[in-house]
Image (cartoon, rainbow, N blue to C red):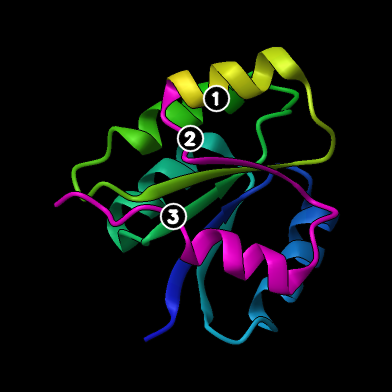
Amino acid sequence: MDLQVYLIEEHAQVRQALAERLSNIEGVELVGQAGDAQEALREVERLRPQVILIETKREDGLGLELVRQAARSAWNPQVVVLTTYEVAWERRAARRAGAHEYLLKEIDSAELLKRIQALPPRKM
């Protein structure tokens, strides 16, 4: 069974490129995507994906809050930060907020799949 993944990325062109890339990874089913924070939270609640990929660097400043809220979801999804560049304090803050991984967007597709498949089992 494919991993169900939801993508949260505020920049439309970047989101489209990532969505296309994710859709072409065998073993991944991209179940949804959004740029708007509130829309994303409503969608992940409705769709309940196994993995939520979140870009934390957002103009609205809600990146870490999205991580926090997604990580507290009742169905216990795996939350992964997928970001453009690493910032040490952000990596630590993302972990404290509940992120299971902190990855750079430059990761190749095979490695991305490997890393999300290696996440610890979800606690139900």
Q: Amino acid at mark 1?
A: Ala
How far across and how far down the image is residue 114, in percent?
A: 59, 68
Q: Is residue 76 above or below residue 66?
A: below
**Which residue is painted at 68% across and 12% down in the image?**
89
Residue 94: give its label. 1
Q: Would residue 83 appear left or right of 70 to someone viewing this image?
A: right
Tell me which segment is drawn in magenta.
97-124
> Which class describes the residues within 10 Å of circle 1: few (<14), some (14-19), or many (20+)?
many
* Residue 120 percent across, percent down from the top left: 36, 52
Q: Circle 3 sits on which residue? A: 119
**Element carrying mark 3:** loop
State the image quarter where residue 33 is shown. Answer: bottom right
Q: Is 12 or 87 nearer to us in this picture? A: 87
Q: Is residue 96 magenta?
A: no
**10 Å neighbourhood of mark 2: few (<14), some, or many (≥20)?**
many
Q: Which residue is mark 2?
A: 99
First reached walking from the N terminus: tag 3 or tag 2? 2
Counting residues from the start of the chain, the first of labels 1 and 2 encountered is: 1
